[in-house]
Image: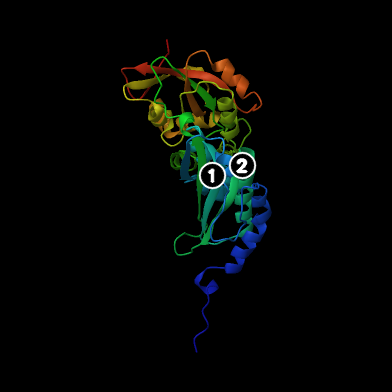
Amino acid sequence: MSSKVDYKSAGVDIEAGNEAVRRIKSHVAKTHSAAVLTGLGSFGTLFSLGDALKHLKDPVMVQSTDGVGTKSKVTVMAGRYEALGHDLVAAVAGDIVVMGATPLTFLDYLGFHKIEPEIVEALVRGMSAACVEAGIALVGGETAEMPAVYAEGDLDVVGFVTGVVDRERLLTGANIIAGDVLYAINSSGLHTNGFSLARKLIFEIGGYGIDAQPEELEGKSIADVLLAPHANYVAPIKRILDAGIPVKGMAHITGGGLVENVPRVLPDGLGAIIDPATWTPQPIFSLMQRLGNIDDHEMHRAFNMGVGLVLIAPPGLREDLAAAIAGFPQFKVWELGRVEGNASGTRFGEVN
């Protein structure tokens, strides 16, 4: 007689999933306000838009989705999972706040070869902390165990954010003109971008282990710098916009770096000149550039190089921007470059 077959024998442990849900409930609840009408376990999430929309003349919904990509591989190597949850929220929220939107809700998708409840809890604890920091409700998600889809040790982490903005306050870059200034706000490191190249440079070419401390990193380990959480820009951008500073457009510096992301917000016929002498990238970037003998242009195309946001506004506003985010000591503002007429793309050089 053949033995009985159940779901667990096929590689899916329902009890582990239930334990993961039990562990994360309290973390998720910390992100909820009275606008959240359902808890974990409902088939769909319910969020009241009454308060969010009542002051808007012409509400526009703004949405984005992203994952953390190859950074998850480094996370598994180091066994540090909480920051990855934070990264997910910061990455997708950053994509809509640069359009002027207020993020309201966040959904996650967590995929595993095998669910380990303590790892799920660490990921959601990080997400919840980032949501609280940004005033976003973590309204639900999906945790999937699929041993036939993911290899052993694999995890897949994806996030979905929804926000709103009044149409008249949308930041599209349409009114940017030549002579406007590119103001930069710093990143906290690689964020979630360029990790395929970073892994090749550091682990394959450099031969470093995850706990190694190269001299350039000044006492920090590879894990410390590669897994530094993605900066959460929601609150500082809100301060800037609420202060009435006439920002015309913003670029979140994600995959493609400064080279690809700044032109996304510029009208046709305009380009950007960026002066690399205006800032010093974090040491991890110089370490990787040395290991791979990579030219400057490729570094600025693969990585954010220490610039997390670019705000485009008229000249003379650096001090106003700095004053608006003075309550966030982790961020600084500087003049990065200018918008050029009769140009396109991004070039690097001295700004006159």
Q: Earlier in the sequence, mark 1 or mark 2?
A: 1
Q: Is residue 175 visible?
A: yes
- Report how far apart the C-alphas of labels 1 and 2 lie in the structure: 9 Å
Give the camera-side residue of 312 and 114.
Answer: 312
Q: Residues within 10 Å of mark 1 (few under 14, many from 20)?
A: many
Rendered residue at 53%/16% (across/down): 317
Q: Label 1: state its secondary structure.
A: helix
- Which image quarter holds the C terminus? top left
Residue at horizontal 61 percent and vertical 30 percent from the top: 218
At 54% from the left and 21% from the top, the residue drawn is 245
Q: Which mark is residue 197?
A: none
Amino acid type, residue under disc 1 in the picture: Leu
Q: How many marks?
A: 2
Q: What mark, if any, has residue 88 been given in the picture?
A: 1
Judged from this view, the residue extending furthest toward the bottom is 1
The residue carrying pointer 2 sits among few (fewer than 14), some (14 to 19) or many (20 or more) residues within 10 Å by Cα, namely many
Residue 165 screen position, x and y as percent: 50, 35
The residue at the point 46 percent across, 29 percent down is 168
Contact between marks 1 and 2 (CB within 8 A): the answer is yes
Left or right: 271, with 83 as reference point: left
Q: Is residue 193 left or right of residue 140?
A: left
Q: Which residue is mark 2?
A: 130
Q: In the rendered image of this protein, does residue 230 appear above or below residue 336?
A: below
The residue closer to the viewer here, 192 or 168, is 168
- Dot 2 falls on a residue whose secondary structure is helix
- The x, y position of residue 306, in whole percent, is 52, 28
- Horizontal side of residue 297 vs 309, given as left or right: left
Instruction: Give x and y (percent) for residue 40.
Output: 61, 58
Q: Which amino acid does the dot numbered 2 rest on?
A: Ala
